[in-house]
Image (spheres, grey):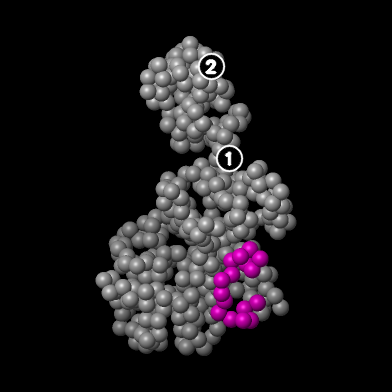
Amino acid sequence: MKSAFLEELRWRGFLEATTSDDLDAFLSEAPRTIYVGFDPTADSLHLGNLIPVMGLAHAQRHGHRPLVLVGGGTGLIGDPGGKSTERILLTRDKAEEHARAIRAQLSRFFDLSSDDKALMLNNADWLCSLNLLDFLRDIGKHFSVNEMIKRDAVRTRLEERDQGISYTEFSYMLMQAYDFLYLFQHYDCTIQMGGSDQWGNILSGKELIRRLAGERGEGITFPLLTTSTGKKFGKSEEGAVWLDANRTSPYQMYQYWLQTADADVVRYLKLFTFLDRDRIQELEQEVAIRPEKREAQRELAFQCTSLIHGPEAAEAAAAASRILFGSDEIPSGETIAMLLRELPNTQVESGIPLVDLLVRTHLAESKGAARKLIEGGGVYLHNERQTDPRKTVSADDLKWHDGAILLRAGKKNYHLVLIR
């Protein structure tokens, strides 16, 4: 019998590998508790974390119980996977601070109204109180060093003679395997999911459950995503795209998705939205027939920004984007506030000559350059071209709330002017 949850993951492109050929039957027999772990290496998740988040959210939508595990304990150790050098160890206070921030972000994706629907835990609650000798005797004896050094994350580091790997990071897979055992014993968790780089750690946990409990634990891994050009997904020119609005604003988040290539947009709609198959197929047709309209990219940008920052922020980001690309719509107060955060802005008195305003806002180097810019048709107020170098900017030019005027020089040099 096919599992509706696994079928959803297959169609959307989430499945890299599973630890059992009969996982469909296992998932169909009864609702399962399924966990994904997130180590608090920073005070925010980034877009690269979204695949396991969305995969776990689909589990809840198909009747399974997601268990969101914040790695307040494992984060003190550091996963060697994906790193060519030793991580800088977090202090316990910093790990706790990061964990709190990440818990808040993850809570947006799940219905946490009762423990029956979902759980959110922190592995510091059990890892930080472990007795070392008991752990080595009871857990460590089930791990073969011969097998551990064959794992990609360890082998790669061992081959780098200048770096190597510390015992601290070498022990990480024991911590993660113990997490799986602990969650199995205390919360009936039988499935762990994670990126393909977690395959070895998941297998270790599965084997530990078999040896110590004589029971079944399974795993699912997701692909590590790259763009169609081979670039790492979730990176912009400025670096990682963060879920924290103070690191990556809702407008910047919206723009990141809006710039998705045609070759990637349908794949991203499947992975990063909850749109159904019919709607995604409609958008796929739009990409094929009318790619210049970029309807699929706008839908992707709105859905993802809404999911991460809420519908109101997504609406404001979409409106700000339209305005900066030539729309003459009247923005809401929230959209103006968003533009104020994104654009340079200056307060001026009513009645300032446009020439002076261009110099004041550094859109022109001098009054002479400002006059030439105006006469050449390169100056706009609210996306309306200005051609008179004698013009003064006053309250008569106010079309928006809060005394704001959008000033533009050339195609992309924007400034928000606030009339006092």
* x then y, percent, for residue 102: 44, 57
**Residue 184 in sight in this render:** yes
| Numbered marks: total | 2
Q: Is residue 251 magenta?
A: no
* Vertical arrangement, residue 112 with respect to residue 148, above or below: above
Out of 167 and 353, give the one closest to the viewer. Answer: 353
Q: Quadrant of the C terminus?
A: top left
Tell me if 212 is positioned left or right of 274 in this view: left
Mark linked to residue 387: 2
Q: Is residue 386 left or right of residue 355?
A: right
Between 360 and 417, which is closer to the camera in this rendering? 360
- Secondary-structure class at tag 2: loop
Residue 318 location (% of width, % of height):
58, 40
Any magenta on residue 21? yes
Q: Residue at x 36, y 85 (%)?
A: 145
Q: CA distance from mark 1 to mark 2?
A: 29 Å
Label 1 belongs to which residue? 318
Depth check: 35 or 291 in front? 291
Can you name the residue that lies furthest to the top here? 390
- Residue at image coords 67%, 73%: 3
Q: Which residues are magenta?
A: 9-24
Question: What residue is drawn where x is 49% and y is 19%?
Answer: 374
Residue 257 badge: none
Q: Secondary structure at mark 1?
A: helix
Look at the image and tell me whether residue 139 can be seen.
Answer: no
Left or right of 288 in this view: 317: left
Percent across and percent down for residue 315 are 59, 40
Neighbours of disc 2 within 10 Å: few (<14), some (14-19), many (20+) = some
| Above or below, 94 relative to 210 | above
Coordinates of residue 172 in the picture (x, y in percent):
37, 74
